[in-house]
Amino acid sequence: MAVALFIKSEDLKRKTILDGNVDTDKFLPYIKLAQEIHIQNFLGTKLYERLQAGVISGDLTTNEKKLIDDYIQDALIHYAASEYIPFAAYTIANGGIYKNAPENAINVEKDEVDSLVQAERNYAQYYAQRLIDYLCNNSALYPEYSTNTDEDIKPDTILKYTGGWYL
């Protein structure tokens, strides 16, 4: 089955810390991963599949386009960045695993990378909460939202925050 991404690679470069010349092939899998893991959990299987089909066939309703443009995209952008950042410095090739270090650059420490990941995740969770609230308050506009059965993923209506303080 074809997969339609709800954001473009330019969106990720324009709205996150990713530099404009980062190779799209490096982070495209993380957009797909974030969409399948995070966004599908908020939409549920049926609505997720309907939006996928609508993007592919070009027959999204006005409400579905609003859902993607106003709620899904911002959450997906930041979830994708949070998934990609820990792997950005590495290349796996036939000769092994390499850590990229351009001239005149200083590699950052793990806690700095973790901080960047957590910041992106915080942004993503803010937008995800807005997505959940919108869907809960407007579920009648999206019939597929409440029709999941059996092995389908049922939509998460409560956001499970990560990070923060541990006591």
Image: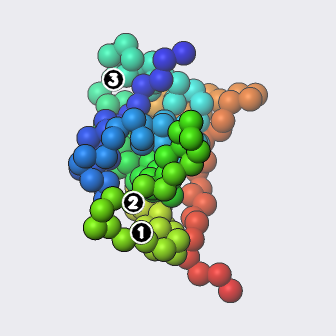
Residue type beneath disc 1? Asn
- Where is residue 104, by image quadrant? bottom left
User: At x 43% / y 71%, what residue is drawn?
Assistant: 108
- Tell me the number on the disc at residue 107: 1
Dot 2: few (<14), some (14–19), or many (≥20) neighbours within 10 Å? Answer: few
**Residue located at (49% from left, 46% from top):** 91
Q: Nearer the viewer, residue 158 or 88?
A: 88
**Picture disc at residue 101:** 2
Q: What's the residue type where badge 2 is placed?
A: Ala
Residue type at tag 3: Thr
Residue 60 in the figure: left or right of residue 108: left
Disc 1 residue crowd, few under 14, some 14–19, many 20+, Cα 10 Å: few
| Residue lying at 46% horizontally and 31% vertically, measured from the top left | 142
Q: Position of residue 106 (x, y in %)?
A: 36, 71
| Up-down relation of residue 43 to residue 156 (above or below) | above
**SS under mark 2:** loop
Residue 148 higher or lower than 110, as above or below: above
Judged by depth in the image, the label closer to the viewer, 2 or 3, is: 2
- The residue that disc 3 covers is 61
Asked if the residues shown at circle 2 and circle 1 are in contact, with their CB atoms under 8 angstroms apart, the answer is yes
